[in-house]
């Protein structure tokens, strides 16, 4: 695990979250999730949800799969989440690279 989950939670609770690209926005909208829904999901991530770290030439992401209640019915969603912590002018921000089923 590349990023400290406590630091991720701290940034998420302040809604210091950004989406990396239009596809992430689209995937979240297709799920019917709001920023509050996304931050709630991220705030409950645990080490047990961690799957792997993916390294790219320009970024490193931790990958999680989180089971979360679907607000539209009684089922659960298994959300694939790829995130990283970035430092933007001394403020840690959680950048989401993927958030989909």
Image: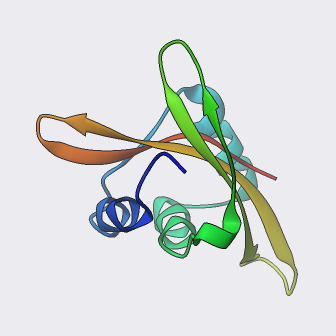
- Residue 53 spot, x, y in % from top left: 63, 40
Where's residue 8, x and y in %?
39, 59
In the figure, 17 relative to 42: above or below? Answer: above
Residue drawn at (44%, 50%) of the image: 3
Image point (55%, 37%), residue name: 61
Residue at the limit of the structure toward the right, as seen here: 75
Identify the image quadrant of residue 45: bottom right
The reply, left or right, for residue 101 in relation to residue 21 is right
Can you give x and y, in whole percent of width and height, for residue 40 in the image?
A: 51, 73
Q: Residue at x 44, y 63 (%)?
A: 5
Q: Residue visible at 30% across and 67% down?
A: 10
Above or below — where is 7 with respect to 25? below
Residue at the far left in the pictured view: 90
Q: Is residue 13 left or right of residue 97?
A: left
- Tell whether 64 sits left or right of 19: right
Asked which quadrant contains residue 4, the reply is bottom left
The single residue placed furthest to the top in the displayed view is: 57
User: Where in the figure is residue 55, as x and y percent of width and height?
Assistant: 59, 26
Q: Is residue 46 above or below residue 61?
A: below
């Amino acid at each position: 695990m590349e990023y400290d989950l406590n630091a991720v939670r701290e940034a998420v609770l302040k809604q210091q979250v950004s989406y990396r690209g239009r596809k992430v926005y689209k995937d979240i909208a297709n799920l019917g999730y709001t920023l509050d829904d996304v931050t709630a999901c991220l705030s409950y991530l645990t080490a047990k949800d961690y799957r792997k770290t993916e390294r790219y030439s320009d970024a490193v992401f931790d990958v999680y799969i989180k089971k979360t209640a679907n607000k539209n019915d009684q089922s659960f969603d298994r959300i694939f989440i790829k995130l990283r912590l970035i430092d933007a002018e001394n403020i840690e921000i959680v950048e989401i690279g993927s958030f989909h089923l």
